[in-house]
Image (spheres, rainbow, N blue to C red):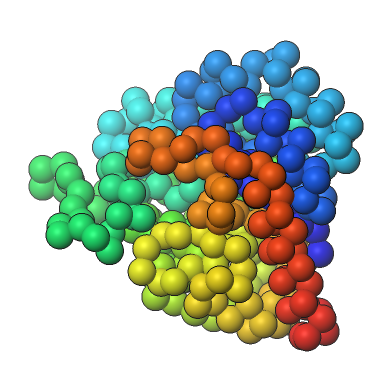
Amino acid sequence: MVYSAAVWAFDWAPPYENAITSIAKTGCKGVELRIRTREELAQYYTDERVSALKAQLAQTGLALTALNVTPQGASSVDKSEREQAVRDFRRAADIAEALGAKLITVAASYPFDVEIIDEHYKPSMQVWEVKLPDNPDFAQNYEDYLDTLHQFAAVCREKGMKLAIENQPTSWARNTDAVLRLLEKLGEDNVGVTYDVANLTMVGELAEIFAYRVNKHIFNVQLADNHGLSNVHWRPGKGKNDFNALMRALADVSYDGPYCLELGDAKGAARNPAAWYEPFGDHDTLVHEHELAIAEMERVCREEGV
């Protein structure tokens, strides 16, 4: 197994150099970098910075298991915004290529690109609501989103890369059936799934069933545990998931890709400052949390003989 770590658990936003240095101490062999906003794409990931990041990865011995991209406007009702999302994605793919990544993972878009209130607050909110456009046409928006994803897939194909769509609560890929429908509608052989285990638990599904049903289309796994009430990402063993059953399932479907520890709510983790959290993590604490997570997963694998 190749363990990777999500850079955003260490530092929510750039610069990521310190996070990479800390991840190299965890026992992980890989890192998943992220481009979260259009501003990061333009201001942080300059050609000079990309060259420096590539050199740092080589020096630390970390592989870039995936570049995680959040394309703004990918499912907007505004065609010009969707077109801009494609241009942004192409620039992100150029960065991935320069960094040596073979996989780009994108978070599934919300319908109409609406803003969703931070799900961590859900258990304590009286009303969990979203502002939809007037008279929303969901069927058309789905087709528009499919068209955007086809263009993302074409960019990846040009560069010999794969595209993995991450299951996200309330998004166009919110659960197992939504993921399978999206893949069937796309019909692209270089498009698969980034399986976020904690995201799936939040919507009330069992981790191992997703693995069996999505099967060969899983290109990347983001490992975290969850209690099923809100979108927390704890280290494995701290929540409700049966990781023994999950690892048996992934072995049964012959998954051989990376396992990215996305410990966004582990002790010491950085969090979105827009949600009133500290954007920079406690790296020493997080290194230990990742060591504990790897030890737990290795225990599970020994028990299951995988």
Please indicate whether residue 219 sits to the left or right of residue 145 in the image.
right
* Image quarter (top left, top right, bottom left or bottom right) of the N terminus: bottom right
Q: Residue at x 55, y 35 (%)?
A: 280
Q: Nearer the viewer, residue 80 or 55?
A: 55
Tell me residue 99's x, y (percent). Answer: 76, 31
Q: Residue at x 67, y 27 (%)?
A: 94
Tell me residue 269's x, y (percent). Answer: 55, 47
Query: Could you tell me if residue 21 is visible in this image?
Result: yes
Q: Residue at x 37, y 63 (%)?
A: 230
Query: Could you tell me if residue 211 is visible in this image?
Result: no
Please indicate whether residue 177 sits to the left or right of residue 95 in the image.
left
Tell me residue 132's x, y (percent). Answer: 18, 46
Q: Is residue 56 above or below residue 1?
A: above
Q: Which of 228 and 26 is in front in this view?
A: 26
Q: Which residue lies furthest to the left in this view?
A: 134
Q: In this view, does 185 lie above or below 228?
A: above
Q: How many labels does the image show?
A: 0
Q: In this view, does 161 lie above or below 255?
A: above
Q: Which residue is drawn at 20% across and 49% down?
A: 130
Tell me residue 256's x, y (percent). Answer: 78, 65
Q: Nearer the viewer, residue 265 or 104?
A: 265
Please indicate whether residue 180 sits to the left or right of residue 14 in the image.
left
Q: In this view, does 205 lie above or below 107?
A: below
The image quadrant that residue 58 belongs to is top right
* Image quarter (top left, top right, bottom left or bottom right) of the C terminus: bottom right
Please indicate whether residue 67 sits to the left or right of residue 116 in the image.
right
